[in-house]
Amino acid sequence: MTRNRQWLVLTLALILLGGLLFAYKVVRLGFPAWPDELSDQWLIQARLDVRPIEGPVRLSLMLPARSSGFMVSKENFVSRGFGLTIEEDPFRRQADWAIRRLPEGRALYYRATVINDTRDRRFATKPDFPEPPRLEEPFASALHDFIEEVRAESADIESFAAEVLDRLRDDSQDENVRLFLSDTDNKLERAELAQTLLAGARIPTLLVHGILLQNDASSVPIETLLAVHDGDDWLIFDPVTGHRGKPENFLIWYRGDDRLATVEGARLHDVQLSVKRKVISSLDLAKQRTELLGSAIGGLSILQLPIQTQSVYEVLLLVPFGILVIVVLRNFVGVSSFGTFAPVLIALAFRETELLKGILLFVLIVSLGLVFRFYLERLRMLLVPRLAAVVTIVVLLMTAISILSDRMGAETGLSVSLFPMVIISMVIERMSIVWEERGAGTAIREGFGSLAIAALTYLVMTIDMLAYWVTVFPEVNLVVLGLIIALGRYTGMRLSELLRFRALAAEGDKP
């Protein structure tokens, strides 16, 4: 019972560990589960056109900070002659330029590359309750009446905020709303008004400023959203439409009541934001994300190895899949073969020669090798010299076939040298022994069984998806190991035995 439990626990642990690592890299780090997937990468630029007045100049620009859905992978500043410092905390980043004298107008640039971020990130810290705004009459009375009416028609903070924004959108029936809207001309002022009305009910709010990453644009406006804290989390609303939730592809640039850019000692002639979309490989994007996050799990791949080493390990990591095929065919189907793992090595040789050509070459070399092996048997040679002689004969056969095929203008024979000659020699030796001990029929059957297993193993190991998985997700071999261990306790009937004993079962049923 203890062994059964250990076997079950080990099997489940390996499969679960491999599956969890795979899922983490796909879901959290954004590694594509399928090859050739593409993703968007955004290049954003802020251009500040500064015109001199006199004296020292100080210029500030809010920078993209922590944002759910996106992260800045790299950024740079173009500001010749200016000194630059960056102030930052988890939710606020600001670039400060300074120059003692600005002789002429100049353009300063901030450029950044933005990629998708699959992590859920905190929006902002939990705020304090705001103080009620102090307004003059008639605004104070209008605010009191407005809050009482909204409170009577709402159940919680979310519905309260939604009702406030709904009333601001449809102001024709409410005199109090018309009074407040008389001084609002744009979306920012509408958001600031909603912030004031919600502060009257002591509901914490925060202005959120950002841009929509949709298409290439030389000039994109800063959009303002309203974030409302319900006591547990932040709820985001469009202050004009009242729509709940952050728009898709909305990059949060900064939060709060500050302006995007401010200047002292000069005139800020223009601030222009532009966006350019770039399509890149999802795998390259995931590697960038892994480096930025410093994830150890994301580094569990062979992508960091030299290219030549990657090619070697890509083949080696496919071997467990071939072994799994052998386990299924031998233990469940009952296919006989020479040795346990010789077929997978032959399958690796088929990767160089292609399947059909490789089978023909394998049959040709083994057949000729058997002829010479039976002749050596008549000389009564010892085992080691006989094996050495067989290996030498295999080498000579491969050389002869290569030369002959080259003269015939065929390239297939040239690749025969890539066969593992020792494995072929052992197959020839094993087949001759089985031939002598159990007859020609058994030897030929096991020979074709080895060839069939090798062919099927080759087909599995040449699946492009598996080659991609073992390169990016080598942990899938933990799942393969778990399956092999799970199959290792099977002691039931094989399919070949069911066919073999079917005749006996039919005779037993006769009266």
Image: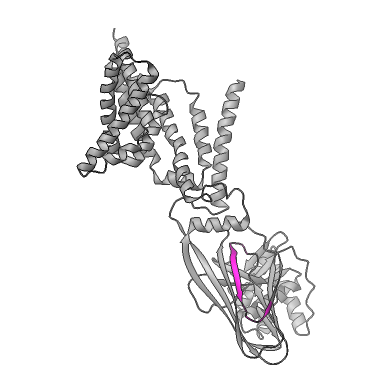
Question: Looking at the rendering, which quadrant does residue 466 occupy?
Answer: top left
For the C terminus, which image quadrant? Answer: top left
The stretch in magenta equals 67-83
Give the farthest residue toward the top.
511
Residue 433, how many percent across, how many down?
34, 17
Count of numbered marks: 0
* In the displayed structure image, the side of residue 101 where residue 364 appears, left or right: left
Q: Residue at x 49, y 30 (%)?
A: 484
* In the displayed structure image, the side of residue 232 where residue 4 appears, left or right: left
Front-most of 373 and 366? 373
Magenta-span inclusion, residue 423? no
Q: Is residue 309 above or below residue 2?
A: below
Residue 446, how many percent across, how many down?
33, 23
What colour scheme governs how the chains and residues are painted in the rendered image of this protein?
one colour
Front-most of 330 and 306? 306
For the N terminus, which image quadrant? Answer: top right
Question: Looking at the rendering, which quadrant does residue 92 occupy?
Answer: bottom right
